Structure formats: C-alpha cells, structure tokens
Amino acid sequence: MNDTKFTLNALVLVVIIFTAIGFFFTVKLGKLADRSILNEYYPIEGTELGVRYGTEQPSGLYRGGDNSRELLLAGTFGYDWGAAAVGNALWLNEYTSTDLGLMRCRLVRLNTEDFRREAVLEDTVLRGRCPSGELVCLRGCLMEANAPEVNPLCALYCMSLRDLEPDGSSAEVLWLDPETGEIVYRLRDGAAATAAFEARYLARTLGEVRG
Amino acid sequence: MKKVKFGVGIRGALSGAEVAVRVTQVSALSCVLFLLGASTYRPMMLHRGASALLFDLGASALPRWFQLILSFLYRKSGSEVLLAFAILVPALIFGLSAGRLLRSGKGRAAAARRVFGLLILADLALRLLPFRFNLAFGWPFALAGFLLRLGCLVLVWLDLRAEKKARTPAEA
C-alpha cells in the first residue's frame, strides 16, 4: 500500500508539472497566437474623448481626432452599454478577462483632469442614464457571455460573495447620483438581467420607478 | 486483483484517514483536469458536459472552507492558472504530510486520526448551515459532497474504534 500512496502523491506532482506546461502553451502562447484584428473607436458624446478597442494599438481611453489620437488611459472600457460624462467625472464600464476568458465588468469613475481611475462598484454593469439623470446600473449577476447557468467556474466565482448569484437571482438595479456617486435608490429584481431592462428602468425616471 | 481492506492494524491496508486524504486529492485532481481541458478547448466552459460535472463533484467534495478560500482567491486574482496551483499544491502538501503523520508512531497517528475526524465533522456541520454557498453547485452536488465526506468520517471513526478495541485487551 505504500506504493499506492506514493502513486497518488506522485500523480499530483506529475499533474502539477503538466499543468504548468499545459497552461504555458494554452494560455501564454495562445494569447500570442491570436491573430484576430480589432480596431474600433467610439467617441464619447459631449467630450473630445473616445474608447478604442484594438489589437494593433492598445485598447483604452483616447483623446483627439482621427489622425492625432493620444492614449490617456489603457484598459478595456465599455461604451456599448453606457457611459456618462458629468463635470470632471467620466463613468464607464471596465471589462477584465480571466486567463480562460471569463469576462467581468466593474463600474469605474475616471477623472478627466488627471485620468485617475477609481473602481466604484465591482461586478456591476452601467446600463445607461434614466430620463431624470441618474446612472442606472445592474449589480449581482455575471455577464451573459460567460454562460453563467452552465459554467462551473461562475459558480466558484460567486460562491464567496453573498450578493452575487450565477443565475442573476440576487440581481439589484442601482440608481447613482452622477455628481457624487452615491446610490440614491436600489431595487432587488431577480429578473432584471433581461431584454426588458431598457423599457423597465432606462425609459422611466427614478420617480416613476419608485411609483 | 488486490483487495483493499479498510481498518487500522491490517498490514498493507488503507486506513479510513488515508482514504479521506485520497478523496481530497482525487477531488483536487478532477477540478484541475477541467481547468486544463477548458484552457485547451474554451467552449467546454459554455456547455454542461461530463467534465463540468466532474469539476462540480470534485469541488463539492473538497472541504468547504477550502472552497471558500479558492473562490475568494479566484475572484481577487481572476486567474485560473493561479487557481489550479492553489488547488494542487495544498493537495500535494496535504497528501505528503498526512501520509507521514498517519505512518508515524502509534500515538501521533491516533492523534492525527482524531484531528482528521474532528475536521471532517466540522466540515459536515458547516455544510448543514443554511448559507447560500452550500448550494453553489446545486443540490445534487451538495448532497454528493456531503455523503462522500460523511463516508470518510465513518471510515475514520471505524479506524478509531478498531484501534480502541485492539488497545483494550492489551491494557487489561
């Protein structure tokens, strides 16, 4: 039986070595071998800033026209679902990916004077502004692209957080004051992460939602 | 085929505590195999296949406190590579040190068995508490993990009982 014990410990050791080699090829070299080309630029309304997603040039926040764009802050910022410029503050989604491609989103506030980035809410998606001016965010669910209902890594990711469920059942809609960043109203809605979000929350003022 | 016997004092047999150590190590291995598979073929994460079930079962059979640490680490680091090593390295250290302890002098080995039993008992108690994290992988896996750990506890208890019985005549 000493042999059995040796075998299992040795097997774990062998798996450690193969894991290191395997991840080196699949994760590190896989990223280098990715030849997909992406170059998109989305100007942010009301500002001279824009968000670029690129493979040739770094993704991030840029300033300037077509020929003289200057990188202000590197990062994968989102402009597809919502961004808001209020005074010196620019509210954006920031996406980060894990080694295997699990996408995470957080709400960040950028100071447009010194371009300091401040993470305001983790695992939160800014979905836009409602007619009364508040920022409307969705918190407590993972991005649909991760297939959270079937992905076991999502279950592990959410396990140690009380208000994060892979199926979105603990989702919350938050209304933030764009001037101060304070949460002015929150509403628990397990079905918030659906296509009806815009009609239910973005098309109505906060007063209407409060009823 | 060689028969595996359980119980202390049977030369060449696996004791219950050793089975518990192996269950933990095999659970760790099954989790990492999924991670390795998913790194090779990413869509594996997006479909509920056999490997995903293996991951769920393996993760459910790990001690709950260890799962919580792994989850916290994964959320903070966002790295599956780190996660894989955070599973494997403690599994190896646990296997080596537990094996040493269980094969050391009788007194130390018995004490180690008692500690193992208490740790598994504490883990089972934690699993019964009404926290959301206990159902992170769903009811079937929570139940399977509980039963697996309960089986380990029973084996450790049988060890301790056999040991006590073997000692009693000698003392008398």
Image (cartoon, rainbow, N blue to C red):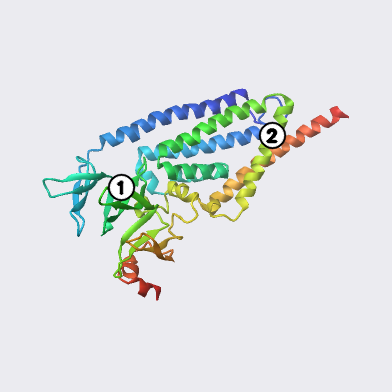
C-alpha separation, residue under disc 1 versus residue under disc 2: 55 Å
Q: Are marks 1 and 2 on the same chain?
A: no
Q: Are marks 1 and 2 in contact (CB under 8 Å)?
A: no
Name the residue at 26% across, 45% down: A73
Place of residue A63 in the rendered image (x, y in percent of width and height, measured from the top left)? 18, 49
Q: Chain of mark 2?
A: B
Q: Which chain letter matches label 1?
A: A
- Residue A116 - label: 1
In percent of the image, x 57 and y 37: which residue is there? B24
The amino acid at mark 2 is Arg
Tell me the kind of residue under disc 1.
Arg
Q: Quadrant of the C terminus of chain A?
A: bottom left
- Give left or right: position of B96 versus B49: right
The residue positioned farthest toward the right in the image shown: B172
Task: State which mark lies toward you, 1 or 2.
Answer: 1
* Number of residues whose C-alpha sits closer than 10 Å to that of mark 1, classed few (under 14), some (14–19) or many (20 or more): few
